[in-house]
Image: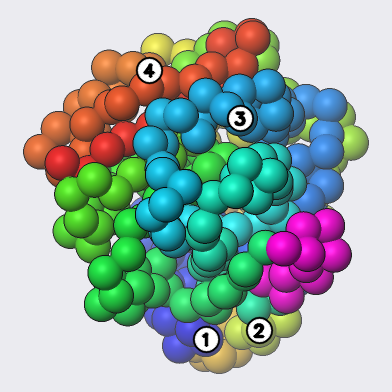
Amino acid sequence: MNQQFLEDVATGLGASPKFLSSKYFYDKKGDELFMKIMALPEYYLTRAEMEIFTAQTDRIIDLLGVLKETPFDLIELGAGDGSKTKKLLAALLAQGYDFDYIPVDISANVLEHLEDVLSRDLPDLTIRPQANDYFQTLETLNQVDRSKVVLYLGSNLGNLSDELAHKFIYELGANLNPGDKFLLGVDRIKPVEIVLPAYNDSQGVTAAFNLNLLHRINRELGANFNINQFSHVAEYDEGTGIAKSFIKSLTTQTVYVSALDESFEFSEGETIQTEISRKYSQAVIKSILEGTDFKILGVLKDEKDYFADYILGRQ
Ligand code: AVJ
C-alpha cells in the first residue's frame, strides 16, 4: 500500500494537470471526517438513501427475491458505518431469512467498529468481516455454492469514470452466478444549487477532508506541504452531472517529498484534482450496464428524487 501510495503520488504530482486518487482520503482522520460529512446538513446523499432503506425495506427485500428456505451471503462492498444496511439486516432477521452478512473493506479499522456496533444492536446476526480487496473476496466466496446479494451503496461508484464503472460492474458479474443480485445506490443528477453545497459545506468539513490528503502525504511520505497555502475547490457541471474536487495552490511554491527525494513546483492557482463524484441519470446507468451481465429489476427512489437504489439481477 505504502509503495503504491508513493508511486501514485509521484505520478499524480508529476503530471500536468496534477491529480491524486480519492481512495487515499481514507486514513484514520479521513474516515472520521467522512463520518462528519455524512451528518452535515448540506450532504443530502446519506439521508436520502437512509430514507429509502427505512421506508421501503420490504420492497427492497421483495425485489431481491431472496427465499427463506435458501441461505445466502449478503456482501457489502465498502461497508462504512452500516447505518443504512442495519435497516435491511434488521428486517431480514425479523422476517426469518437465513443469511451471513459479509462487510468488505480495506480498512480493518472501519470493520472492527462496524462489528462492534452490529453485534450489540443485532445479536442474532452472523457477521463475517473481510479486510481485503473486493474482487479477491468475491473470488474466494464464489468457491462455495451459495446465493449472493452484493450491496454497493452511498454512490461510491461515483468516484469512478463511466469507463471504470463499467469495468467494475462487468468484473462483478464475472464473480457472481446467474440469479445473484446487486443492489447499487447512486446519487441522481440534480441542480447545482443542491449538489455544490454538499461538496463545499459551510463548516469547512469537506475542505478539511480534501486537504487531509496533503497532511497524509506529509506524514507518510515525509513531504513539506504548507497546508495554509492551499485551498479546497469544488465544481459541478449540471449538464454532465459530474462534480469534481480540487486542491488549489494559493501561491507559487515548491513542495519536497523526501520519500521520493523529489520536488514539485506549483504555480499560483494551479490545481490538483482529487476526486470526481459522478451523479447519474437512468440513461447513464443503462449505458454503464450495457454489455455487463446485469439487468435492472427495479429502482427505488426517495421522496425528493435525489437518490436511486437499483436492484440488478445477474443474468
Ligand atoms: C463516499 C465517494 C460517495 O463522492 O459523495 C464526500 C465522498 N467526497 N464529500 C462522495 C465525498 C466529498 C463521497 N463518496
Label disc, if present, on residue 57 of the rendered structure: 3
Is the C-beta separation of discs 2 and 1 under 8 Å? Answer: yes
Start and end of the magenta stretch?
110-124
Q: Residue at x 18, y 49 (%)?
A: 178
Of callouts 3 and 2, the N-terminal one: 3
Does any portion of residue 205 appear in the rendered image?
A: yes
| Type of the residue with mark 3 | Thr
Identify the element where label 2 is drawn: helix
Label disc, if present, on residue 167 of the rendered structure: none
Of callouts 3 and 1, the N-terminal one: 1
| Type of the residue with mark 4 | Ser
Q: Residues within 10 Å of mark 4 (few under 14, many from 20)?
A: some
Q: Residues within 10 Å of mark 1 (few under 14, many from 20)?
A: few
Q: Is residue 121 above or below residue 40?
A: below
Identify the element where label 1 is drawn: helix
- Residue corresponding to mark 1: 2
- Residue corresponding to mark 2: 220
Percent across and percent down for residue 207 are 75, 45
